[in-house]
Amino acid sequence: MKKKLLDNLTTIFAVTAITLLVWLWAESRNIVQDKLPDVRVRFVSSQADEPLRITVDGKSGEKADEQTVSVTYRASRGEESQLLDAISKMGTIMLPVHEGDTVVSLKTLLSESEVFKPYVVNIVSTDPASAEVTVLPLVTKIVPVKVKANGPIKLEATAEPSEVAVTLPGMYASQLTEMTAYLQQEVYGDAEENVPQSERGVPLSGPYWFHEVDPIVNPSTVQVNFTVTKQTEKYTLPTVPIYVSAAPSLLQRYEINLPEDQQVLKNVELEGPADVIGMIKRGEKRIVAEIRPTAAELEGGIKYVALHINTPDQVKVISPLPQIPVTVVVREGSGAVQGLGSSMQLR
């Protein structure tokens, strides 16, 4: 009796197990069609050692190489379950592209991807069906760093490091010859002249087109070591000739004479921008002195007249200027003549 009962239970369990296995097999072979609405894909270089700049549909900036795709697929329930699990673990599906690719089929790339390829899954369609990709080879170029100041100042400056590595599309590499570290006025404005200074974290800039190609600069900032060079210089001119400047009508009416020993001004000390002072030293800019008597002064019988020295912009006379004695004689038979001002040297 007990043996018969045991045989019956064994039979029941065997039938149940077989039935369950058959059901599971049939269920796994049940073909379904469904849609994954938000599959994230990222386009990457097909070769790990081939650096590429990849953008999709003209996008720029962060995640310019990514896109969201809707995927309609057909698969058995068993394959579907494994596929969904794989997608959830990966998050973003990598789609390899090659240099020169322009319009790529998303259905083809997804079918061959490491997520879909291991499973018996038929991708029916994708939305969008294709993507327009721009694939540019990248190169890394070592360029020097030049230091410039945003303002009218002269610097002796170097960057540390003096060179940086810039990674950018190869087609732009020949146009990049240097990077620039701009020293702002708030940094050097109160700096003492001829005293070495330093400023860390100075950002680098490139040509006007530079940021449009999303370059990678390493390092992106530098330390600038600088010295504000002396901006002004003093110089003593040994002699400066003195001229008379007056209206022609006055010069026709009056004879204006200076003493023989005071027709040249000696040892005139000037101060100004170093480059302008250099031009004066080389004789490229001429300095002259003038006396400019007025009609009222001449009619009043002046004995001393003030000196005026014509200097270039930003150059000033720092030595005191003497009053020059003059002798004024009225010319006989002179008449008043109107005209423009003129200058003549007395000798």
Image (tube, rainbow, N blue to C red):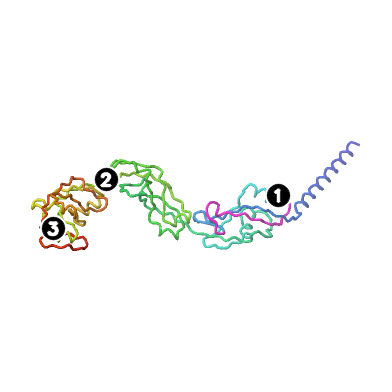
Is 59 within the magenta? Answer: yes
Question: What residue does disc 3 label?
Answer: 254
Residue in front for this viewpoint, 304 or 337: 337
Say which of 275 and 325 sits in front. 325
Q: Please state which amino acid type lies under the numbered disc 2.
A: Lys
What stretch of residues is rendered in magenta? 57-80
The reply to whether dot 1 and dot 2 touch (C-beta < 8 Å) is no
Q: Earlier in the sequence, mark 3 or mark 1?
A: 1
Please name the residue that numbered disc 1 is placed on: 81
Give the x, y percent position of residue 160. 36, 45
Which residue sits furthest left? 260
So how many labels did they put on this image? 3
The residue closer to the viewer here, 345 or 1, is 345
Q: Secondary structure at mark 1?
A: helix
Name the amino acid, label 3.
Tyr
Q: Secondary structure at mark 3?
A: strand
Say which element carries label 2.
Answer: loop
In front: mark 1 or mark 2?
Answer: 2
Residue at 67% across / 48% down in the picture?
Answer: 85
Q: Which residue is mark 2?
A: 230
Which label's residue is closer to the chain start, 1 or 2? 1
Near mark 2 (Cα within 10 A), the count class, few <14, some 14-19 or many ≥20, is: some
Q: Quadrant of the N terminus?
A: top right
Would you identify the image quadrant in which residue 55 lies? bottom right
For marks 2 and 3, the one nearer the N-term is 2
Counting from the top left corner in percent of width and height, residue 20 is at: 80, 47
Disc 1 crowd, CA 10 A, few/some/many (<14, 14-19, 20+): few
Please provide percent x and percent y for residue 258.
Answer: 11, 53
